[in-house]
Amino acid sequence: MVIHYKCPNCGDDMVFDSESGMLSCHSCGRKDNIENFSEEYITTAFSDGEAKEYQCENCGAVLITDADTTATTCSFCGAGVVLADRLSGTLAPTKVIPFSISKEEAIQAFHAWCKKGLLTPKGFMSADRIKSITGMYVPFWFYDLNSDIKVQAVGTKVRHYSRGEYDYTETLYFEVFRDITLDYVKVPVDASEKMHDELMDRLEPYHYDQLKDFKTPYLAGYIAEKYNYDANELLPRAKAKVADYIESFIQSTMAGYTGVNYRKKEISTEKTQSFYVLLPVWMVSYDYQKAEHIFAMNGQTGKVVGKPPISAGKVAAWFGGIAGTSFIALKLIQFLLGGGIW
Amino acid sequence: MRKRLLTGIIMVISLFTFGFFQSHVFASTQHVYDYANLLTSTEVKQLENLAAELGAERETDFIILTTDNTDGKDVVQYMEDFYDDMAPGYDKPHGNTAILTVDMEHRDVYLAGFYKAKEYLDDSRLESIREKITPDLTEGNYYDAFASFMELSHDYMGYPPGVNPNNIFFQWWFQIGVSLIIAAGVVGMMLYNSGGKVTVNERTYLNSKASKINQQRDQYIRKTVTKHKRPSSNNGGGGGVTGGGHSHSGSRGSF
């Protein structure tokens, strides 16, 4: 692994100065203590002969793995032809969450998940047609985001009461102001073009206590996809992810009001840090009625996501059952309220 | 096989005729007093049958009273005198009776309930029935109005006193609609979650140590109050007591 320390001042590479024990920049002369150096300016790259790159001729996916692992099929399309290439100088991940679910456990977990499917056809639930199961590291960007929020609103509290022959509606108006700081850490966004964003979002959460510094041996036996988008390209998606959280936080600070009318809402979200992480995913390819279904499993927690086939009969049965039960329940309520049965 | 079917049919028919016959025995014979001649003789016969059938189930005489000459009496007074004089009632003379009175002279309509019908058809239920049949009276569909008076009274008497029979909870379309909406919601949710649930929330990535409300202000500015007169439950309509001392519920209106 080759580690680059970028000068926060001028962007040139800094080197370790053994005399002072500090990182020093040749261009501008800046010196920094290596312990306190911000991670943001540290980049690591693969060194020569450390990792290999494969490109699938069929679907164009770019995969990387350690020098000793050989990829024979593409994890995405299953095509057998992959080209190997030596890899050097490419940006390496900073962190990794290693697989904690083995292949056998993954197959078992997938079987268990198929059995639980309430709407899936019977033939699918037996889960005996697993075509292939591949463990792969999916590239993610982790963002630390800081949001500064200022909200002005008019809040209303409504009270109803009656006196004499009149019903009164009393509305109290309040001028509401909130200044909030929200800090989000390690918001994951997948940097793979091949993976569906929605699918990857549903794989969350990963437990960060097992987040490790990346070392090439973690890749042994697995395939990692190369990232397709850099940290700046995906920043809007990270912001969009926390936007909903911010909105619900704002609402939670105004819970005492009957209605809130926003006058001004200033939300500025800034990235404080981002880093490149590999997260473990089992890709399961499953044959059902001549169609291939792809599922993804969180390689740390065993959570399965993907679009299973849906049985129309089961959907109809559930629909009918629930509608019928609700109807009987309503009739029961009617009976209890003294409305008879019909 | 055929024979058995035949005996079955005969048994059903005899049961029906017996039930019909029985209700005629206990109910008083005349229910339609059409002094204003609003109905044809077939219509009268049909209403009589309806009154006998529905009245037996509710142990109440459903009576239609029409007039075009009240001798200067008010419609309520006219009805009360009618009740005192004719002494209708399902269980006994001056018994359970619901009367619909139509005064063609003043175009007034009055609904009254005596005894069991007074308890089960209180002022508000009678008012609800009156509101439903008034359009038919206005348009001159007297037969329809009278028939629905009997049917609605019969239906409403199926609910214990104090319960609003028009409660939306009791309506078929509402119950079916709500059931379908619940089922669609639940199955839709199941379909949506079949590909894996979203299990992160707004707290997952929040660093609560560095997140806080820096400043908040809630300043009272003003107050508005609106008032509405409560719709009075029943003004004027109401029931009363006949000269003979029989108290009744009631609802009056014009058409």
Image: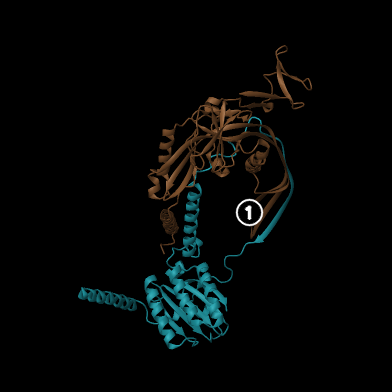
Chain colours: A brown, B cyan
Residue A314 in view here: yes
Please name the residue shown 45% across and 84% down the image.
B33
Horizontally, residue B170 falls left or right of residue B223, namely: left
Q: Position of residue A124 (x, y in %)?
A: 40, 47
Q: Is residue B214 above or below residue A37?
A: below
Q: Image quadrant for the C terminus of chain B?
A: bottom right
Tell which subunit mark 1 falls on.
A
Residue B246 in view here: no
Quadrant in which residue A266 is drawn: top right
Q: Secondary structure at mark 1?
A: strand
How crowded is the residue under tag 1: few (<14 C-alpha within 10 Å), some, or many (20+)?
Answer: few
Considering depth in this image, is B9 or A68 the residue closer to the camera? A68
Q: Image quadrant for the N terminus of chain B?
A: bottom left
Considering depth in this image, is A18 or A154 the residue closer to the camera? A18
Three-letter code for the amino acid on which mark 1 is drawn = Tyr
Horizontally, residue B31 falls left or right of residue A242, namely: left
Q: Position of residue A287 (x, y in %)?
A: 43, 46
